[in-house]
Every structure is written in structure tokens, then in C-alpha cells.
Image (tube, grey):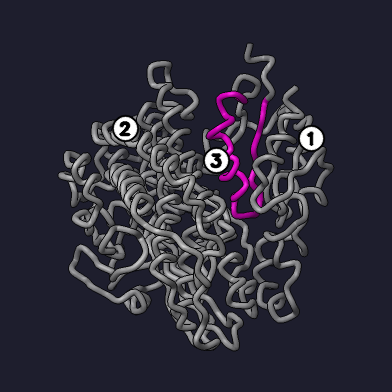
Amino acid sequence: MHTTNLNVSINKLSKIEGHADLDIRIRDGKVEDVSLRVMENKRFFNQAVKGKPYNAVPQLVSRICGTCSIAHLTACIEAVEKTLSIRPSAQTMLMRKLTMYSLMIRDHALHLYYFVLPDIFGVDSILDLAEKEKELVHQSLHVKEAGNNLSNLIAGRAVHAPFEAVGGFSRIPDKTKFPAMIEELKSIRPYILALAEILYACDWVLIRKTDFVAIKTPDFSFLEGFIASSSGASIKEEDYWDHLHNVVLPYSQASGFEFEGHPYVVGSLARVNLNKDNLSAPTKRDMKKYLDIFPSDNIYHNNLAQAIEIMHSIDHAIEILSTAEFKEEKPAQPESLDGEGVGAIEAPRGTLYYWLGIDKGKVRYANLVIPTAQNLISMREDVRDAATKILACEKNDRSCEEKIRKEVEKIIRAYDPCMSCASHFLRVNWV
Amino acid sequence: MAKNKKRVAIFSFTCDEGCSIYLIEIFNKKLMEWLEKIELAYFLSVKDKVEIKDFDISLVEGVISTAKDKKEIEKIRAESKILIAMGSCAATGQPSGQRNLFGASEAAEIKTELEANDYLPKCLSIKEAVRVDDEILGCPIDENKFIEVFEKYLI
């Protein structure tokens, strides 16, 4: 029988977005408690958005998170537009797709190269890779730079993109730069295939029988569609909130969510599981071997799914840049200045939901559901299960602690949480 | 060899971490060149935590919003030869110190939470909290300005 008593504490988890601490309490060989605490100090966005003009709020909420700023900006713009009956043009929607693709390329690349590869190769940092793997460092920089350049070209900048606004973009992109951009995107395709091969060969397994939830978009563009789940749900974006249940997690500074009464998982794995048929043709052709393993219950396949999404983002961006005509146009205008509405998109880490109320052009309230909050319950359960499993087969307390520490960090990184976002769930103000 | 390299540390206080994310984008072009001259001694986005000790250049983003963070920035200051306030929050206190600008009703809403969690009455910019040697404005930092200021300290 085990009599292990241990407190495994990790103060400031590294190689994730934002700050979080983790404490696992083990008594008599049993995991008593897992507490994952978001260690972000509050900036009180709930109060800050109140009374602000509708067209200023997207840039304000962009500051919720530097990592996913484009996702917050885009989701909030959509919510404002739905609320005030603003109809963005087809050209605007194409530019938003390109902007989202630029985000996916950069953000997934950061997660995979900087956070995940060190775990796979058993080093502290990507910069510590052995000489024969050093090429991966150069490849990571090229991939991220291509995403960064695409953000610059379409939206003005990768973080707090200045050109993306309510009703349309404030500038049209410089077409003379398209051929070079297309060439750059093409040049990183082999790197993504090499990255996918590493993730495919990685033998980590963490099976979670769960419900996967994502917005199913007809062109896998992360923007518009209906919310689907592997349990068969098909929900309009504006009705999503009605299917969610907010769970307060003690000591965490964040709320978790259940979908239709059970824990669920959002993000790349959910999207590829539910919607792989709608990926772009070149991605499907060149990544067939990797796509064949989806749908998958292995949480670590979230990493491979991210690599697939980078490839899709490259391929669909190339297609749009090669075919679309961009001309000067005026931003679409509001039909009213009052109402409430929902904007929902797929952020890098999963479904991002904005619900706004606007009165006389000023925001009265905002309610958000962010991806990390939706994965929090599953992530905690997986940390608990992993620690329990290690306890069952390890006799020595010290090696047990070391193993738990390594394993749970790996699991948390696979979920790719964003703690900056997790700390800023805005509660509904029922007024 | 390694002894001559500047030990660079990057710290995030209360903010969206947009500057350090943008710094990683600046790395795309500059990292390989800079690694000839610097060692990334502390950067949680890239490597595990190490002791706060003996840094040549510390780049600090965000605002100071709790008493605990105030102590930490003081320690960082004491352990850094050069400390650079990175971005608008660090240099001016805004936008992350937005609660400083709240009207009476919003301020009343957050009062209990502030007091229960050891928050300072007002957020401080890094400049207000400790002495800084230089600053780079922008939300996020401007790429060219960052390169210009940072490289001054690599000579």
C-alpha cells in the first residue's frame, strides 16, 4: 500500500501563455486536490468597456491578450456588427480570413516550436537543441516571420492590428507585395511538413473520451459557421451561451465551463476532428498521412492538429492572395445604435464568444467565453489522472514527484492554455 | 566565451504581454545576430524559471498592481545593471492601469476585490515603481525603436 504524502508545487509554469501556478496535494497515495491557479492580476475589463463607444471597444479588448489579440479584436468586431446590423463586405471577410490565418501561423508556431519541441527533445529551451536539430530554430523563425509579414500586409501589425475595424479595414493591402508574400508562404510549407513529421512520430498518448466542440466553417476559415460537437450538436453561434454552464473553480481566478452538462474540449484538435473535410485541397493532399489519424481522442494530437492548421492557413492564404481583387471601399455603417448581439469565432485555442449590449452607440455590457476557460475542467482532470497513474507505479517519493512534475507540465502545454485570457472572463451584468 | 555575453532578462508584470509577444516577432529577424552578444537568462515564454540574479539588461513590461509585484520589481532593479521599461504600460502606466481612470461607480465595484487581494490603491508604471535607465514606448513596442534602444546596451 502507498502511504505517499506529497505536495507537488510548480510556481510560475514556463512555456505557456501568461502566468499560472499548479499545486497537487497527495495524501496516503491519493491525489486529493489539483489546483491550477491563474496568476494574472486583474485589469478589470468588465468595468473598462462600460460606456465606451462601440467602435473603440474592439481595440480596447484587443489588450486582453497580446498573444490572441487578433482573435479578441475580430470576435468583438463581429459582435458589434451583429448588434448594430452592420454588414461587412465580401472583401472585408476575405481580409479577416487572411488576418486570422496570419494569427494561426504565428501563434501555433510559437506554441509548437517554443513550448512543445523542448519537451519532445528533452531540453529546456528551443535554443538548447543539439547541433543536428538546430535547423529547427531557423525554420521556426522563418515560419513565424511569414505569419508576421502576412499580419503586417493585411492588418498593419501582428499585435493589436491597427487596420482591422468595425465595418471594414481602414486600408486596402498593397497588391504589389502579394507575389513576394505568396513566395514566402510557399517557402515555409516544407518546414511545416517536417514539423508535422516530428509530432506524428511522437509517441505520447493521453486518451480523453470527451465531447469536442468547435465552430464548423465551410472553408475552415475560423470565422463563420455553426457550432458542432462530436456528440452531434448543431447550434447557432448566437445560442451557444444557452448550452454552457459556468463552473466556479476554487482558488483559480478563473471560471470553467461545461457544455450541455459535461466537460468538453475546444481548440485545434476539436476543429480537425469535426471539420477536416473542409480543409484546403493542397493541405489535404500533402498532409493525408497525418489527417488519417483524426478524429482522435489523444489530447497530444492537438499539437499535430495545430501543424495541420498552419498548413491550411498557408494554403488558403495563398489561394486568396492569388485570386482576390482588392479595391477601395467605404466601411459598412450601422443601421441602429442599440441592441445586443453575439460574435463567435475560432481563436487559436478554441471557440471565442462575445456577447455585447449597446445603448446609443455605447457599450453597456460585455460577456465573454474564452477558450482556456472551456478546457480548464478537462485539463484539471487529466492532470489528476496522470498524477494518480504515476503514484500507482512509482515507489520512490522523490522520483514520483519528479515524474509528476514533468508529465503534468507536458499535459498542460498540450492543451495550450492562455492564462492572460483566462483571467479576464467578464461576468454578465444582468441589467 | 559565454562570460562576455550580456545576461538579458525579460519580465512581465500586469499586462497583456503583447510587448514580449511582439519581441518574439522581432526575434524572427534579429535573434541569431543578438545571440552572438547575449544570453537569454530569464524569459518564461522560452525557458524554465531561474533565480533572479545578476542581469546585465532587464526588459520589463506591464504595470505594478500588487504589493507583491512591487517587491519583485525592486528585487529585479537591484539585480539589473540596466533596466528598460518596455512598452506604454511600463513607461506610462496605461493602458493596463486602466482602473486608475475609473469613475466612482466602477471604482466602487472593484473595491472589495482589490482589498481582498493585496492590490495597490493605484497601478504604478515601472517608471513610478523603480528607477529605469531607458524606455521604449508603443502598444506594443515599436520594432525599430526597440532595436535602436536595445542595441545601445549591447556594445
Question: Where's residue A348, x and y in %?
Answer: 40, 54
Residue B25 is marked as 3
Figure quadrant of the N terminus of chain A: top left
Q: Name the residue under label 2.
A: A190
* Nearer the camera: disc 3 or disc 1: 3
Q: Distance between the residues labelled 3 and 1?
A: 29 Å
Element at label 1: helix
Q: Which residue is drawn at 55% across and 39% down?
A: B24
Q: Please state if A200 lies on the left or on the right of A69 as rendered.
A: left
Is disc 1 surrounded by few (<14), some (14 to 19) or many (20+) residues within 10 Å? some
Q: In this view, does B105 lie above or below A76?
A: below
Q: Please state if A34 lies on the left or on the right of A232 as rendered.
A: right
Element at label 2: helix
Q: Is residue A95 above or below residue B87?
A: below
Q: Name the residue under label 1.
A: B78
What residue span does the magenta drawing correspond to?
B7-34
- Seen from the viewer's position, the closer of residues A384 and A140 is A140
Element at label 3: helix
Please indicate, yes or no, whether residue A5 appears anywhere in the rendered image. Answer: no
Disc with the residue nearer the chain's start (3 vs 1): 3
Figure quadrant of the C terminus of chain A: bottom right
Question: Where's residue A119, x and y in %?
Answer: 39, 32
At label 2, the amino acid type is Pro
Q: Is the magenta stretch mostly helix, strand or loop?
A: helix
Whether discs 2 and 3 lie on one chain: the answer is no
- Seen from the viewer's position, the closer of residues A403 and A201 is A201
